[in-house]
Amino acid sequence: MATAGLSALLLTTEPEVRYFTGFLTRFWESPTRPWFVIVPASGPPVAVIPSIGAALMEQTWIKDIRTWSAPNPGDDGLTLLAGTLREIVPQGETIGCPDGIETHIRMPLADLTRLGGMIDRRQIAGDKGILRRLRMIKSQAEIAKIETACAIAGRAFARVPEIATAGTPLDQVFRRFQMLCLDEGADWVPYLAGGAGPGGYPDVISPARPAPLKAGDVLMLDTGLVWDGYFCDFDRNWSVGAATEPVRSAHRRLVEACDAAFDLARPGATAADLFHAMNSVLSQGGAGTDAGRLGHGLGMSLTEWPSLIAADDTVLEPGMVLTLEPGIETEGGIMVHEEDILITAGAPRYLSPRTGPEVATL
Amino acid sequence: MATAGLSALLLTTEPEVRYFTGFLTRFWESPTRPWFVIVPASGPPVAVIPSIGAALMEQTWIKDIRTWSAPNPGDDGLTLLAGTLREIVPQGETIGCPDGIETHIRMPLADLTRLGGMIDRRQIAGDKGILRRLRMIKSQAEIAKIETACAIAGRAFARVPEIATAGTPLDQVFRRFQMLCLDEGADWVPYLAGGAGPGGYPDVISPARPAPLKAGDVLMLDTGLVWDGYFCDFDRNWSVGAATEPVRSAHRRLVEACDAAFDLARPGATAADLFHAMNSVLSQGGAGTDAGRLGHGLGMSLTEWPSLIAADDTVLEPGMVLTLEPGIETEGGIMVHEEDILITAGAPRYLSPRTGPEVATL
């Protein structure tokens, strides 16, 4: 913060608040109430939160917890927040909010504007990427949680033959797969996407429809399940019945692309290097997809910095957790493959149970 | 919009985008990419979205879909968005963004600031509550979806004796209950909270811990499950073994509070009237809780306007869906009860299967 010219950070979103406090609740699903944590350049963090969260916040290491009865249409914590900022931050100094790519401010825009007029010669600016840099490097405890989430998903994926076969409606596969994730130990399943179709699927973000799986379909399931507040994010593909040669070939190429990135994924390489390694394998097989990137960071959120794209020159460091997510156009649409890896001081390590080159069959 | 002096709405969040387009995907779980929909005062809506969403958006009624390859750290859709706004909105006119309570802008703050300088004598202001007023009144199709979600949760709650008894760890109850919700037809289970403890629970937003249920505990589960993009949000309480008289009495009082609000819940009454009706029943039994309100709107989000608080004078209208959610302090902590109701032209209607006054036992 000293380098960035900031006297405090003002945080408003779930992962930002949890990163500093350990405050873990699914209550953020409710968009009603704003929550604030102030991290001063020196001194302990201060939580300025709705009173409904006080009992749970008191179980964290945060001692200075200030609450208001929310929602309050006339003053939804704003007077309390502004007073706290005036107390903590000297006049003339600057408060940093995450403002860059992959961030947003979770409070009403009218209140954010009003706040600017209530903090008396203090100003709000960006955080100069402080949160991004902190959250990109995971601690051993964070890595262990992500690895547990990956193992749970791995066991659930291994049981997909129990729930999916020719004739099973895709929406039923989605429901049953989420049940497998929970049965194997997921706390909850915030994300499941996928698709099915002959020789490929149309996209990777659609909700499931009731159309039954047919012989010759490729089924893909991509899950972000949570264990103790941390995500995994990887997918698996299956051919319903024997796979055609184009599907087998596409799957082999996707795994080959992952391998190419994996081989490079050491400290000093960049996110762009991994993109190019995958992209050069994929482009030998035809066109890429519209996904916009070939992988990303992973942790408290399903997707985080960096992005595996040509324009991201983030240098890899030990403790980064990345997904490798190559996609390829096929005769039937697209196919996508995804694994989760950890950057270490030496060779990387798979956190998801690595898939072999041959596509599985149902 | 004409009344509000607006030439277009600019929308950035999942429910706002889906409300006008029907674009339904769990991909919003990824915070990486911004998504934009512009609703002009006249003419069709325009989607300005990452290319990964194009195939799915093309399946909606939206015809004008403009995409960029996201994420792009240098220009994450901003040039495309600004150009579209300049094309649609005449110079000197105003673009409205939802900016009031229970809203936020889902795009990086730095980009929002930059956008203001890229739209050439057009300005961004609040939406004057347009989205709030629209979304508060549900159509018949929306009501049917919420009712289906409520019925699914009702069937799952009825099966809780299958999964919870003295000795069952609470985190296992949470996992198994989510499996029941999926088994009964939920598409996914974005929200589950609850608690357990002797004679009451400490709060209603904590994640589950592995402590086993004990005889004398009160168990509460509160779920927001989704069916076809719409939520239910209600809870149930159980006594593990025979309930003590204080627990039975607290449960009766909570149901009595719901009944008092239900009896008043007709067009012309206000959100505050329902609050006072519940609060006067509750205050006969001692102190309230820190929840901040005694119910709220429900629909595409787990919680929506209005709030059942003294300060919310929103007048009830047919088509509003509300939760009645009284809470009460007990010897062991708190107890909360919640039901979902529909405001009609006449008497309201329960969407959740109404609970009787006697607390259930496990």
Image (cartoon, coloured by chain):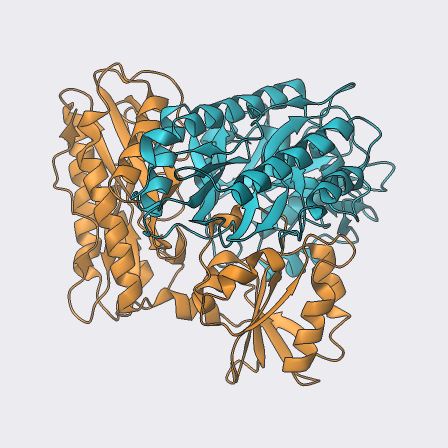
Chain colours: A orange, B cyan
- Identify the residue at image location x=59%, y=55%: A52
Q: Horizontal placement of B172 versus A29: left or right?
A: left
- Identify the residue at image location x=78%, y=19%: B345
The foreground one among B341 and B135 is: B341
Q: Can you name the residue that lies furthest to the right here?
A: B3
The foreground one among A155 and A197 is: A155
In the rendered view of the protein, which quadrant contains the C terminus of chain A? top left
Q: Is residue B34 visible?
A: no
> Would you place residue B207 above or below residue B23 in this image?
below
Q: Horizontal placement of A8 versus A284: left or right?
A: right
Q: Position of residue B86 (x, y in %)?
A: 72, 45
Q: Horizontal placement of B174 versus B340: left or right?
A: left
Q: Position of residue A109 (x, y in %)?
A: 70, 56
Q: Position of residue A121 (x, y in %)?
A: 74, 80
Determine the image quadrant of residue B64. Answer: top right
Determine the image quadrant of residue B257. Answer: top right
Q: Position of residue B334 (x, y in %)?
A: 55, 50
Q: Is residue A103 visible?
A: yes
The foreground one among B160 and A271 is: B160
> Would you place residue B126 above or below residue A203 in this image?
below
> Would you place residue B61 above or below residue B120 in this image?
above
**For the image shown, how many numbered marks are present on the structure?**
0
Q: Horizontal placement of B202 versus A291: left or right?
A: right
